[in-house]
Image: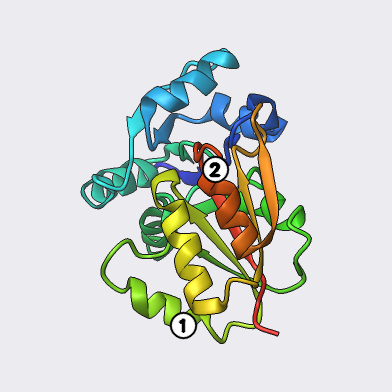
Amino acid sequence: MSQIGKLILVPTPIGNLEDITLRGLKVLQNADAILAEDTRQTSKLLNHYQISKPLWSYHAHNEHKQLENLLKELTNGKTLALVSDAGTPAISDPGFLLVRACLQANILVECLPGATAFVPALVKSGLASDAFVFLGFLPEKKGRQTAFKKLVDVEYTMVFYESPHRLLKTLTQLGEYLGLERMASVSRELTKIYEETVNGSLTHIINYYTTHPVKGEFVIIVDGKK
């Protein structure tokens, strides 16, 4: 009987390619195959470090269909590395379903430490980081109003991800539910050339992004209820 394989989650840089760890590179070099959210995006990283490995597509639209085949590969002894386009897999990215299935099948799962966008954004926000709640992306339509109502009484620092085309809408709604004077911080393009962090009240941040370009990926940090 062949030895069972394992799944290794490998965080990838959120912008600056130098932010991948030496251990992360070693895992990618030694894996039998790499599961990638976007094979084109991951190819850029692998080419930069001259790593040549089979790339298998694994993303939000095919992860259910892929489970059975991937479990079979792992059971047959393959070591598979899972990466997302940027940051740590399964944090607002595909990965949870596969990890859960592996654990249920007694397949070893490892997760390397590494890049995650909300950590530097939280630390440089100046808001309390000893206790916080990560909420990822708020619902786009269904359940959105309910989600905002639940935030009103949260006493911990709140952390969100947001896309550029919804940033101002989300900031405005946070102001409506939490108060426009609630302190917050918005970081974009972390680790990249145009990295930017704007701190202050929600009013200040809304005014800033009303007159400045809204480009890149955003992390929103909001102070908890006092």
Q: Name the amino acid, label 2.
A: Thr
Residue 198 x %, y %: 68, 50
The picture quadrant where one finds residue 157 is bottom right
Q: Which residue is mark 2?
A: 211
Residue 49 shows which numbered tag?
none
Q: Please state which of residues 196 and 64 is positioned toward the viewer in this rendering.
A: 196
- In the image, 130 versus 206, the foreground residue is 206
Which of the colour schemes (rainbow, by chain, secondary structure, one colour) is used? rainbow
The residue located at (64%, 43%) in the rendering is 115
Q: Quadrant of the C terminus?
A: bottom right
Report x, y in % for residue 8: 53, 44
Q: Which residue is depicted at the point 65% across and 82% down?
A: 225
Measure the alpha-carbon separation of dots 1 and 2.
30 Å
The residue tagged 1 is 150
Crowdedness of circle 2 by 10 Å Cα count: few (<14), some, many (20+)? few
Q: Position of residue 89 (x, y in %)?
A: 49, 47
Local crowd at mark 1 within 10 Å, few (<14), some, or many (≥20)?
A: few
Label 2 secondary element: helix
